[in-house]
Image (cartoon, helix red, strand yellow):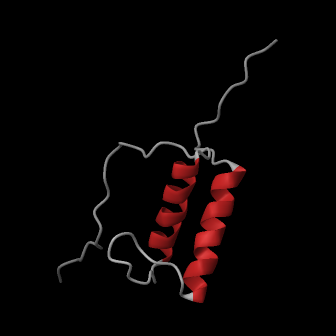
Amino acid sequence: MAARKSSGRKRYGKAASKRVESAMRRRKKGTLKSGRSGKTVKSRKQAIAIGLSEARKKGAKVPRKSSGRKRSGGRKRSSR
């Protein structure tokens, strides 16, 4: 039996996808709250992060966070 060659990209399980989908719906409805502060989440990225975090807690297949180089948060400004 030939060994399957894994592609270099990350693979998420169906359960993880469902969790993220649910988080996105809750965000749209305005009922998605963040951790301790309990503030309403408005950011799309934060909603995805919350969905993946919930999926990890439930034991869904979520790839590990990459420990590669970090990107800077802001945009680079060109000086004129």
Q: Nearer the viewer, residue 38 or 55?
A: 38
Tell which residue pokes out farthest to the top in this image: 1
The number of numbered discs placed on residues in the rendered structure image is: 0
Depth check: give the residue in front, 28 or 74: 28
Task: Work out whether residue 36 or residue 3 is closer to the camera in this orientation and state it.
Answer: 36
Say which residue appears at 60% left-offset and 64% top-offset: 20
Image quadrant containing the N terminus: top right
The residue furthest bottom is 30
For residue 70, side relative to residue 61 (left or right)? left
Q: Is residue 37 above or below residue 60?
A: below
The x, y position of residue 26, in whole percent, is 59, 79
Q: Residue furthest left?
A: 79
Splitting the image into 4 quarters, where does residue 24 fall? bottom right
In the image, residue 30 above or below residue 74? below
**Can you give x and y, in whole percent of width and height, for residue 68 in the image?**
35, 43
Image-based side of 72 in relation to 55, left or right: left
Residue drawn at 64 percent across, 35 percent down: 7
> Residue 30, located in which quarter of the rendered image?
bottom right
At x 46% / y 84%, what residue is drawn?
42
Position of 76 compared to 15: left or right?
A: left
Q: Whole-percent x and y of residue 36?
A: 33, 71
Say above or below: 26 vs 52.
below
